[in-house]
Image (spheres, rainbow, N blue to C red):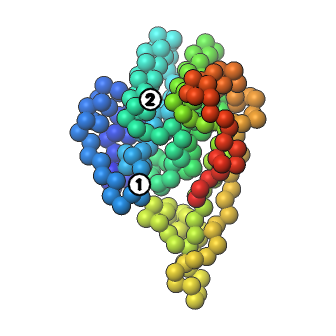
Amino acid sequence: KGTAGRAHPVHVVAAAWDHGCLGKVLEHAPFCVGDGTISLSGHYDYPLHACIWGIRRLRRTPGAEALLAATGGLINTLMLLLKYGCEPNERCEAATPFVEANGLVGYSPIDVLARCALDLEKAREVDDDPNNHNIVMSLVASVAELLVSTGARHHLQRPPLRRQLSHTHSSWSSRSERAEIGPPPPGNPEGNAPLVPLRHDPRVRISGNDTLVAALGGAERLAAAQEERGGAAPVGDRGLLLW
């Protein structure tokens, strides 16, 4: 896992969409689940999320040829990470520098993609080349299709603005969360206080949001990708957060 504020090498090469280098790094990257408190993605500092987050930089990439070249690197990197075992529905839980700096606590990969789509659409008015914008948004739709076809659910509850924590701090609690929660109340050294109320990010709500669904490729395309996976129905209340 990354140390001293530095991301894991798997995260770094995934964020750069260097799938050739990523394959070599994964061959030699040690992974130990320890006591079972950390996932594969968490151990590698959420490379799948970082890979998708990089889509935002494409609006600064000049020329259709360069954009199309970058597209291949992104898709191949995503496919390699998914094949290796990164879960398409895993939410960012660890308070890593990448997660906290970009406000991605509680985000699943498709939530990250939705944030990218929203940011790109917001920047559309100031983009100099509308053709570039269309290419990037086409890529966003392709990534959504890939994620859904490999098991990502776009019907999950919106990501929270922060994790739901009690006064018992985990080793991954952020400094701001520890300050907000404060010390355990007097007479309760175990810290078994009520959980801090959970607030959800209003920006990322895919289900029922026609504009966002359209940005991710449209309802028909997402439904077809889901059918390819096996026709899993929306999870409804069973998709609620577990922490």
180 to 87, vertically: above or below: below
Residue 64, numbered label = none
Residue 50 point in image, percent of width and height: 46, 38
Can residue 91 be seen in this snapshot?
A: yes
Q: CA distance from mark 2 to mark 1?
A: 21 Å
Residue 78, numbered label = 2
21 to 35, vertically: above or below: above
Q: Secondary structure at mark 1?
A: loop
Residue 8 point in image, percent of width and height: 34, 45
Query: What residue is rendered at 35% in x and 26% in y?
Result: 19
Query: What residue is rendered at 67% in x and 35% in y?
Result: 233
Residue 3 point in image, percent of width and height: 32, 54
Viewer-closest of 166 and 121? 166
Residue at the extreme top of the image, as rendered: 65
Query: What residue is rendered at 57% in x and 23% in y?
Result: 228
Q: Earlier in the sequence, mark 2 or mark 1?
A: 1
Can residue 158 be seen in this snapshot?
A: no
Residue 16 point in image, percent of width and height: 39, 31
Viewer-closest of 88 and 21? 88
Residue type, numbered disc 1: Ile
176 to 157, vertically: above or below: below
Would you identify the image quadrant in which residue 117 lies? Answer: top right
Left of 122 or right of it: where is 163?
Answer: left
154 to 72, vertically: above or below: below
**Which residue carries the number 1 mark?**
38
Q: Secondary structure at mark 2?
A: helix
Residue type, numbered disc 2: Leu
